[in-house]
Amino acid sequence: MFKSDFLDDRITRYDQKILENNFKKYRRTNIAEMRPYVFKEDNKYMSISGVDCPDNDMGMVARNPKNHQDQWYVARKYFEENFEEI
């Protein structure tokens, strides 16, 4: 059983609506460390959302500046709309 299967079984539509309404807006206060995604790279060490397809999208890989092993994929469109190189 996947974690999402477990949650789907126990969260009602009402609960899901409450969870959705708990999102708040936050401003970033730090610099992001990112690099371009490399086509067909071994991505077993980065987190990738189920809706992303890095080999088709070719976005960026971000990392936690305090823990370089903590890496995640950032979709190209999101990156282009929200980041600029300094």
Image (spheres, rainbow, N blue to C red):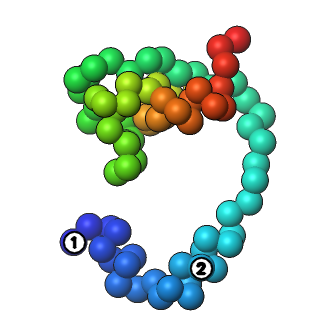
User: In the current view of this chain or complex, which residue is farthest to the top?
Assistant: 86
Q: Is residue 61 above or below residue 12?
A: above
Residue matched to label 2: 17
Q: Residues within 10 Å of mark 1 (few under 14, many from 20)?
A: few
Q: Residue at x 66, y 32 (%)?
A: 82
Q: Quadrant of residue 58?
A: top left
Q: Which residue is depicted at the point 75% across and 53% down?
A: 25
The percent coordinates of residue 66 (x first, y second) are: 58, 29
Q: Residue at x 59, y 79 (%)?
A: 17
Kindly identify the residue that appears in the image at 60 percent across and 74 percent down: 19
- Is 1 rendered above or below residue 57? below
What is the three-letter code of the residue carrying label 2?
Lys
Q: Which element is circle 1 on?
A: loop
Quadrant of the rendered image containing residue 33: top right
Return the x and y of residue 15 as percentages of the image width and height.
55, 84
Q: Nearer the viewer, mark 2 or mark 1?
A: 2
